[in-house]
């Protein structure tokens, strides 16, 4: 018998994504959410005296996958060629005589849009938790390496020292901004509608506003205050562009790990199981940053998913179906993959191997060349014009292989006329240079840590 997994098409089904997150978008889960919305509508209408109370109870009793199955709905959809009508017929049949009140006054989009809001609400909770987990991992590294000197680089070239902890604190602050963005956009995203065709509520009669408010209250959602037949697609586009921002941050952090793990640097390395993990089928010595590379790859796809929702904002009049098909693909994939890459990124940083000795080695290889700014400022403070100090140090750092900066500075008459040997050594000390980075790291940690409790 052929293994069922061998016939799977989408890598989300067998390679990427956590099962518990993928399950949120399963066909059964989506059907169950639609049934919840139908039951909430009936219950609200019963509360307002619009449908019989016993009918609402009967509908609620069968609004689950034990009574309305995916197979039943599939068979009915083959006949009707309409997904929501198939759900309505299956639920009405299961409810018996009470089935006449199923979907009373509603339009299909009332159900699908509100069910989608429940899906997005659950997704927001998952992603918020992911971001906080990543932030914790980064802040832990920031705390442990708050005063660990590391060479800072711009244009791929050595600049001046920072602390590795400050590098991690910078990333933690970036993640915290994403949490703030998610919290700010969430109320705009997690809204449904129960306003009938065209969004006016006419089909529900004079109590339309009460019906919509009651349904959303039962489901824990907000209501789109100005829908057409569907919820405004700017809401979805904002969310997928948020996911693109998160993905870009994730790739930036993963790329930093990949760069620092290069053989020529070797300052950090992502976790690697030395007992059994293989880096190459040919080059047995390889220890590749494959998780960070995987994060980069998935992040590029998540960013690509931001485009269709922008296109979907353009609808013909009050609604068309040009958004429907691609949203069935875009939203589950973008959310599952964003969760996947965030979880992986947190794991990379929790298990990150930080080689402080290698950082020191690279930092001191130039004999203090990375501390030229310190020396320049000190010379300026002692009376040398800043531009003259800059030119002097530019000449002293020429790499002709004769001597390091410390030796050259001590032998230079201009420098020796202004600074003592002890002062030169102190100014060229990486530990003294990173004190400001250490203090700033501490401030970032103190500011961000309380937010992780919420």
Image (cartoon, rainbow, N blue to C red):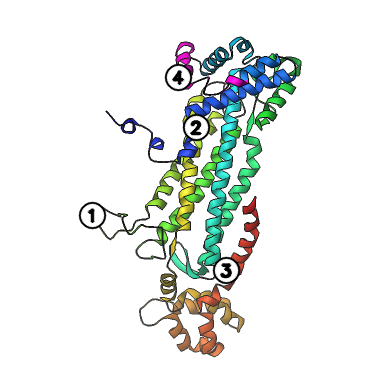
Between the residue at mark 1 and the residue at mark 4, the CA separation in whole angstroms equals 49 Å
Q: Which residues are magenta?
A: 60-81
Few, some or many residues within 10 Å of mark 3 (<14, 14–19, 20+): many
Q: Nearer the viewer, residue 269 or 413?
A: 269
Q: Which residue is mark 4?
A: 71
Relative vertical location of residue 251 with respect to residue 368 in this rendering, above or below: above
Q: Earlier in the sequence, mark 1 or mark 4?
A: 4
Looking at the rendering, which quadrant does residue 127 occupy? top right
Report if residue 77 lies within the magenta region: yes
Name the element at disc 1.
Answer: loop
Name the element at disc 2.
Answer: helix
Name the element at disc 3.
Answer: helix
Q: Earlier in the sequence, mark 4 or mark 3?
A: 4
The kind of secondary structure the magenta stretch mainly shows is helix
Q: Position of residue 109 (x, y in %)?
A: 59, 21
Q: Which residue is mark 1?
A: 282
Few, some or many residues within 10 Å of mark 1 (<14, 14–19, 20+): few
On residue 437, the disc is 3
The mark closer to the camera, 2 or 1, is 2
Query: What residue is rendered at 41% in x and 52% in y?
Result: 292
Query: What residue is rendered at 61% in x and 69% in y?
Result: 439
Name the element at disc 4.
Answer: helix
Between the residue at mark 2 and the residue at mark 4, the CA separation in whole angstroms equals 17 Å
The mark closer to the camera, 2 or 3, is 2
Q: Which residue is mark 2?
A: 25
């Amino acid at each position: 018998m052929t293994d069922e997994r061998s016939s799977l098409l989408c890598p989300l089904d067998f390679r990427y994504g956590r099962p518990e997150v993928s399950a949120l978008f399963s066909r059964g889960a989506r059907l169950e959410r639609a049934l919840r919305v139908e039951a909430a509508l009936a219950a609200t209408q019963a509360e307002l005296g619009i449908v019989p109370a016993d009918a609402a109870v009967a509908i609620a009793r069968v609004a689950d996958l034990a009574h309305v199955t995916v197979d039943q709905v599939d068979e009915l959809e083959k006949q009707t060629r309409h997904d929501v009508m198939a759900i309505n017929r299956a639920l009405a049949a299961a409810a018996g005589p009470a089935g006449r009140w199923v979907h009373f006054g509603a339009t299909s989009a009332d159900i699908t849009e509100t069910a989608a809001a429940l899906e997005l609400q659950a997704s927001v909770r998952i992603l918020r938790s992911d971001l906080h987990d990543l932030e914790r991992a980064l802040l832990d590294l920031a705390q442990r390496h708050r005063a660990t000197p590391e060479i800072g680089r711009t244009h791929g070239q050595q600049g001046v020292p920072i602390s590795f902890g400050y590098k991690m604190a910078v990333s933690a602050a970036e993640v915290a901004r994403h949490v703030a963005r998610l919290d700010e956009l969430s109320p705009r995203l997690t809204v449904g509608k129960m306003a009938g065709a065209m969004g006016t509520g006419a089909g529900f009669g004079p109590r339309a506003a009460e019906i919509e408010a009651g349904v959303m209250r039962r489901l824990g959602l907000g209501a789109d205050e100005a829908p057409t037949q569907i919820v405004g697609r700017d809401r979805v586009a904002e969310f997928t562009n948020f996911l693109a921002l998160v993905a870009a941050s994730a790739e930036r952090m993963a790329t930093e790990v990949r760069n620092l793990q290069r053989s020529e640097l070797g300052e950090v390395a992502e976790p690697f199981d030395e007992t059994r993990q293989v880096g190459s089928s040919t080059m047995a010595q390889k220890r590749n940053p494959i998780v960070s590379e995987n994060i980069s790859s998935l992040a590029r796809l998540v960013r690509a998913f931001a485009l269709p929702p922008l296109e979907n904002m353009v609808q013909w009049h009050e609604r068309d179906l040009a958004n429907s098909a691609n949203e069935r693909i875009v939203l589950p994939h973008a959310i599952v993959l964003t969760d996947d890459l965030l979880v992986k990124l947190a794991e990379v940083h929790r298990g990150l191997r930080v080689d402080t000795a290698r950082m020191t080695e690279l930092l001191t290889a130039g004999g203090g060349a990375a501390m030229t700014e310190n020396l320049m400022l000190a010379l300026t403070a002692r009376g040398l014009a800043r531009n003259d100090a800059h030119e002097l140090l530019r000449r002293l750092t020429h790499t002709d292989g004769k001597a390091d900066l410390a030796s050259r500075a001590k032998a230079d008459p201009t420098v020796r006329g202004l600074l003592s040997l002890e002062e030169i050594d102190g100014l060229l000390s990486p530990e003294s240079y990173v004190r400001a980075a250490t203090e700033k790291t501490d401030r970032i940690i103190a500011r961000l840590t309380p937010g992780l409790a919420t």
